[in-house]
Amino acid sequence: MTILTLLLHAALSQAAPPPDADALRRTVQVEAAALERSPDDTEALYRLGLAYLALGEAKKAVGPLETLLKADSDSVDAVLLLSRAYRASGETDKAKVLLDTAITSKPDVPTLRAERAHLARATDDFDTAVAQYSKAVELSPNDAALVFNLGEAQHKSGKNLDGVIAQYRAALKLDPDLASAKVNLGKALAEKGLFGEAKEVLAAVNRTTLVDAEAHYNLGVILLRENNTAEAQTQFERTLAASPKHAPALNNLGVVWDARADHKKALDYFKKAALVDPSYTEAFFNQGMSYMKLNKPKEATRAFEQALKLEPAASTPYVKLGTLYLEQGKKERAVEAFKKAIATLDEEEKKAGGFKLLVQRFKSERSTDAYRGLALAFLQQGKVDEAVATLKDAAAKVPNDPSAWLALGEALLAKGDAEGAVDALKKRLLLEPSTDAQLDLARAYTKRRIAKEAEALYRDVLKAEPESRRAHLGLVDLFLEQGKYADAEKLLKDQLAKDPNDAQSLARVGVMKSRQQRPDQALEPLEKAVALNPSLSEARAELAFLYFRADPAKAAACVNTTSEIVINEPRNVLALSYLGLCLLAKGDKARAEQTLKAAIDIDKNFGLAHYNLAQVYENEGKLDDAKKAYQAAAALDFADAADQLKRLNAGK
């Protein structure tokens, strides 16, 4: 299901009933005849220009309105009508010059300020729109429509949401019946996360009028976000009753059916939305998603291509394609899709020519997703250096985005660069002083073997949130790394007392007992953990190795299990370490040595890999190499490594 955001569709004011086109045509004839008799008739010029504007023929309105302004250069009405004609004709530069000149000579006329704000908003210049609406409201503080338009411009510009909500409330205080302000207030409350109040506001609009399409539509969006598809469907259908060609409502009905896994019916609605609005990019994008789910890749490709044709600078279709490719295991295609997404962002940067816009854009979810998606695709290909480089690039472009530093820290941990990960996650914590940020940094400190800093962070979190399961398990991992098995066991007992089926705690108990050379106590918790959660790869690896230790004839099964884990997780050092020993048991010494060296390349601080490599070297008669490997394991406080080193040094 696509994740939708609340859309701002409110008009500048309440829409009036459409004029009678025939009457307007007759008016044009009458006023044109009047001008033939008297070319300087300002009333006829005004009425002719106004009639053309009402007919939607803005270009025809320009001539008489320009003549009107020449005849009456002091007329504010003439300036307003001509600027609207310019704007509707696509001549926004002329409209801007006209209005700016008029405002310079008449700075205290609120209608000129408002019209300049309308023009700015039409050209997506929201800062100017806010400034001009603010001045208009200052000049005319009791004009509810102006107060509402200021709030909407602030909303569009991404200003403080609390201020936006206050502005909409102020407009409604002036005019309690201003439906557009109620609809936008509902949308703003939803964006703030106040869904209960938002629903009340929008439902109130729907009770006072049966045909407010936007109120029904946005109430449907909120319900859809809450996964209440039944009520959302009703609201979208009510939207279409009021406005049969409401493309977003048709599109969201497709989303409703997609959520019910009826992809064929969803596709029908996405097609209807595109038919109503052939420029509606999201409808084509959603068609592509449906075709993918219906296993029709050719049709999906065409739909995505159409989406990109309509919006070639949009990264979203490429990001979604890349995500889908990753889910399907198509890593190479995923890389290409994410690269294209990033390329479109770079092109936008060149066109924008401003770093401010770049920072704002990269803070958006779709932009960071493109970089993180590419990095994830590289990681799944085993290209850790490329993943790290990608995320370093993202972090350099958006140094104030905590998610960029988090992603970089995770990639550096995957690379085995704990020192770099600590630096990245420190920056993330400064930008985002949250519990999650503390725990991620603590995990990096654990990997870097800086126990004091790691434990302090875990303790700080537990002081603030005593029931934090993640902090408890992180502290367990730290104690296991240090060989503090008694401390780890106490924490694990506490966790399992709360939930005897906590698979992650059971897995840690099994791993700990295995490290303590107590396989009889390790088997049961490991078997239970794997049964509860088969995706716990380290528990599966430990269990496969324990089966092998109990019965060396199961070396082949151990190789199969650990190999499967390594195929899916090429950087799983525990699985690599056990795979090495099981290969040795099968007599494949060369592959055993290669596998264990690969584990050490990934994480030089993983004592088990050094210890197992020492055993391989000893088996091969490479005693000097074995001593060095045991020495490395002993330096990492790996149990029994120091004793094995003494044995070899004693010539035994």
Image (cartoon, grey):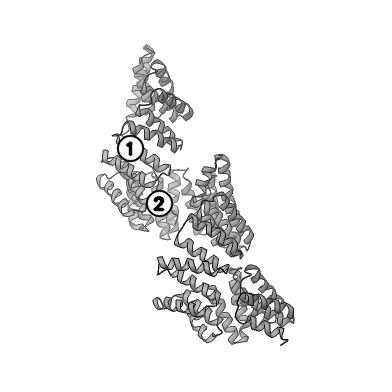
The quadrant holding residue 640 is: bottom right
Vertical relation: 350 (above or below) 633? above
Vertical relation: 38 (above or below) 308? above
Q: Where residue 348 sits in the image (x, y, percent)? A: 55, 43
Left or right: where 173 falls relative to 480:
left
Q: Where residue 464 sits in the image (x, y, percent)? A: 40, 65
Left or right: where 75 falls relative to 300:
left
Q: Where residue 122 sits in the image (x, y, percent)? A: 43, 35
Residue type for callout 2: Asn
Vertical relation: 480 (above or below) 652? above
Return the residue at label 2.
Answer: 252
The quadrant holding residue 77 is: top left
Q: Where residue 462 sits in the image (x, y, percent)? A: 43, 68
Residue type for callout 1: Val
Quadrant (top left/top right/bottom left/bottom right) for the N terminus:
bottom left
SS category of the residue bearing label 2: helix
**Nearest to N terminus: mark 1 or mark 2:** 1
